[in-house]
Amino acid sequence: MKKLMTWMTVMGALMCALGLASCSSLDVTTYAKAQPALKLEDYFSGKLIGHGMVMDRGGEVTRRFVVNITGTLGKDASGVELLTLDEKFDWSDGKKEARVWTLKRVASGEWSGQAADVVGLAVGKVSGNALNWRYVLALPVKDSIYNLDFDDWMFLMDNKVMLNKAVFSKYGIRLGEIVIGFQKL
C-alpha cells in the first residue's frame, strides 16, 4: 500500500508538472495586425486617468482605485528615449499611494521599466495595439513584503482609451488580477 501511495504521489506531481509546462503564455505578436497601433510614448505622454479594481483568485473585488498619471518624454545622457510615468493612486479604502516608472526604449517595440517597488527590470513588448509587461512587484502586506510576478496586458482601443488586465502570481500560482480602464485627457 505504501508503494502504491508513493507511486500515486509521484505520478500526480508529474502530471501537474506536465500540465504547467504545457501552459504557455500568449505571444504579443499575436496582435501585430491589430489597430490602432500602439505607440507607448504617444499614448502615455501627457495626462491620463485610470479606474481599476483588484480581484482575488475567486474573482471577488477586494479593492478599487483611481489613478492619475502624468507621462513625460525625455532622453538619458546617451540619447536613449525615456518615458517617465508619475502615478498617483487613490484607493477606495482612503489610502493614497504613488509610483514613478522610468521606461526606456531598448529596441523597436521593446521597453524596459523601473520603479521603486519593482524588483529588477520590467520587460515590455509592443505589437499592434498590445503591450505585454512582465515584472516582479514588491508588495507590502502587514509586516512582510511579497514579491509577486505580474503578467500585464494593455490594449489600445482608440486614441483615448486603453484597457489593462494584469494577472499576479507567486510560485506560478495565480493569486488574482487587476483590471484598469485608462483614458487620455
Image (cartoon, helix red, strand yellow):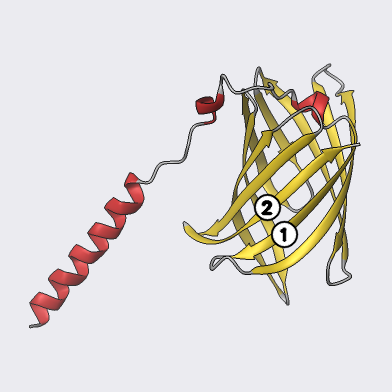
Q: What residue is pinned by disc 1?
A: 53
Amino acid type, callout 1: Met
Using a 10 Å C-alpha cutoff, classify the residue at mark 2 as few (fewer than 14 neighbours), some (14 to 19) or many (20 or more).
Answer: some
Tag 1 secondary structure:
strand
Q: What residue is pinned by disc 2?
A: 179
Using a 10 Å C-alpha cutoff, classify the residue at mark 1 as few (fewer than 14 neighbours), some (14 to 19) or many (20 or more).
Answer: some
Query: How far across and down, in percent of the image, does residue 151 sit?
Result: 58, 46
Above-or-below relation of 156 to 48: above
Nearest the eye: 2 or 173: 173
Tag 2 secondary structure:
strand
Quadrant for the C terminus in the image: top right
Q: Residue at 87% across / 68% down in the picture?
A: 95
Q: How many marks?
A: 2
Query: How far across and down, in percent of the image, does residue 119 sit?
Result: 67, 50
State which tag comes first along the sequence, 2 or 1. Answer: 1
Image quadrant of residue 33? top right
Above-or-below relation of 133 to 2: above
Q: Does the CB distance between marks 2 and 1 fall below 8 Å?
A: yes
Query: How far across and down, in percent of the image, does residue 134 sit?
Result: 60, 42
- In the displayed structure, does residue 110 sit left or right of residue 185? left
Quadrant for the N terminus in the image: bottom left
Amino acid type, callout 2: Val
Query: How far across and down, in percent of the image, does residue 32 sit?
Result: 56, 21
Q: Residue at 63% across / 31% down in the picture?
A: 130
